Amino acid sequence: MAVVTGILGTWFGTWLGVVLRSRANQEAEQLALKRDVLRRFMGNRYMLTKTGVGVQPNGEPLVAMNEAFIVFARDRQVIEALKSMHTAMREKKCSRGIVGLAKEMAKASDVPIELDDWFIEHPFTPKAG
């Protein structure tokens, strides 16, 4: 009887370890996807500001924003910020939505951004002239 209990205990412990590891891997993969979309959005946000030049040939940052609807689908605050950004883009006031979207995406990606709004709205861009 003790042998059977030991075998069942070992089997259950192994099974539980596999399940927990699998869940941790899935969460890590999801977090990596979120951070990738955030990185690409923030890295190309200059395209959406007043000093921006439009969209890059590879479609950034719009590709990252379109992917965000899938990657952040379970993050209600990000989805709301994306909707606000979509409205702002329709009204040709992109910079109005960048701050909120960046902050919500960072929060959902577990990235501690401690930047003020001005810094987010004014990315590194060369001065014309």
Image (tube, helix red, strand yellow):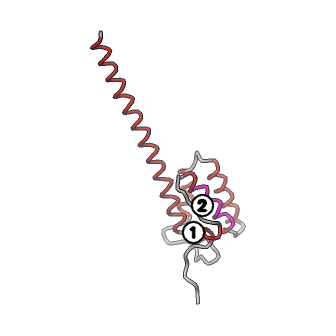
Q: State which quadrant residue 116 falls in.
A: bottom right
Q: In the rendered structure, which disc, 2 or 1, sits on the residue that comes first in sequence?
A: 1
- Main secondary-structure element of the magenta-colored stretch: helix
Q: Nearer the viewer, residue 66 or 126?
A: 126
Q: Nearer the viewer, mark 2 or mark 1?
A: 2
Q: State which quadrant residue 128 falls in.
A: bottom right
State the mark number for residue 20: none
Direction front: furthest residue: 114
Spot occupied by residue 37 in the image (x, y as percentages of width and height): 51, 58
User: Circle 1 is placed at which residue position?
Assistant: 45
Q: Which residues make up the magenta segment?
A: 96-105
User: Circle 2 is placed at which residue position?
Assistant: 102
* Residue at (36% x, 26% y) in the render: 13
User: Which amino acid, mark 1?
Assistant: Arg
Q: Where 39 sits versus 72, above or below? A: below
Asked if residue 55 lies in the magenta stretch, the reply is no
Direction right: furthest residue: 91
Counting other residues with Cα less than 10 Å from the Cα at mark 2, is it few (<14), some (14-19), or many (20 or more)? Answer: many
Q: Nearer the viewer, residue 63 or 42?
A: 42
Q: Are marks 2 and 1 in contact (CB under 8 Å)?
A: yes
Quarter in which the C terminus is drawn: bottom right
* Residue at (43% x, 41% y) in the render: 24
